[in-house]
Image: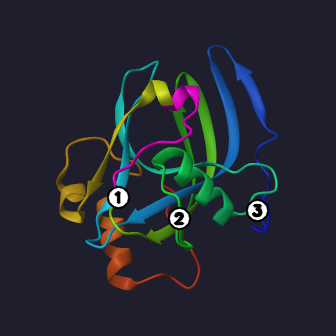
Amino acid sequence: MPNSGRPDLRATTAASGTMCRVSRPTVKLLILDEEDRLLLIHSRDPKSRDECWYPVGGGLEQGETLQQAAVREAAEETGIKELPTGHPVWSRDHTYTYNGREVEVHEDWLLHRVINFRPAPAALTKYERSSILGFRWWSIPELRSTTETVSPPGLGQRLADLLHSGVPSTPIDISE
């Protein structure tokens, strides 16, 4: 991954039965509006049909910085044309299953402050078009009390702690 000092995980792909392991560096965006509401994507896994809410973000392309990837992902997934520079706040190594594939990611999380807007995806992938159900701006109390699946677990409390403590001098590892 450019400028991160972390290994490039994109080269690892192995097949095992019906599961396919894919590793990649990603950027996750904590897009907060003026009322400290967080923009999340609602998605349904095409294979398992499980539903989840998760932040905007995705894999880094060859040669991209985190900020460049954040701007691209935000534009593709939400249609936002001008994304303020994000502040690095968290990192996470995580493995999840999506569409029958095991996906191993290293996530770098950036905090972005924006004026509330209505998401209008501009360039979704085939999988995103088939799985994204919608978007929602969530307050911290809503995130803390929801019975719906939100990724990462405990996002409401993590976000409350971040807003209370401020942007850390170095990103906090939130790996489970």
Q: Secondary structure at mark 3?
A: loop
Q: Which residue is mark 1?
A: 117
- N-terminal of the pair, mark 1 or mark 2, is 2
Q: Main secondary structure of the magenta part?
A: loop
Report if residue 127 lies within the magenta region. yes
Between label 3 and label 1, give the one nearer the viewer: 1
Observer-nearest of 74 and 17: 74
Between label 3 and label 2, give the one nearer the viewer: 2
Q: Residues within 10 Å of mark 2 (few under 14, many from 20)?
A: few
With respect to residue 141, does 23 lie above or below? above
Disc 3/disc 2 C-alpha distance (Å): 28 Å
Determine whether label 3 and label 2 are within 8 Å by CB. no
User: Residue drawn 25% across and 71% down?
Assistant: 35
Disc 3/disc 1 C-alpha distance (Å): 34 Å
Q: Give me the disc on residue 82.
A: 2
Q: List the single residue furthest toward the front.
A: 81
Give amino acid for label 1: Phe
Q: Secondary structure at mark 2?
A: loop
- N-terminal of the pair, mark 3 or mark 1, is 3
User: Residue drawn 59% across and 80% down?
Assistant: 170
The quarter of the rendered structure image containing the N terminus is: bottom right
* 71 left or right of 134 in image: right
Q: Which residue is mark 3?
A: 6
With respect to residue 48, does 158 lie above or below? below
Residue range highlighted in magenta = 117-128
Q: Residues within 10 Å of mark 3 (few under 14, many from 20)?
A: few
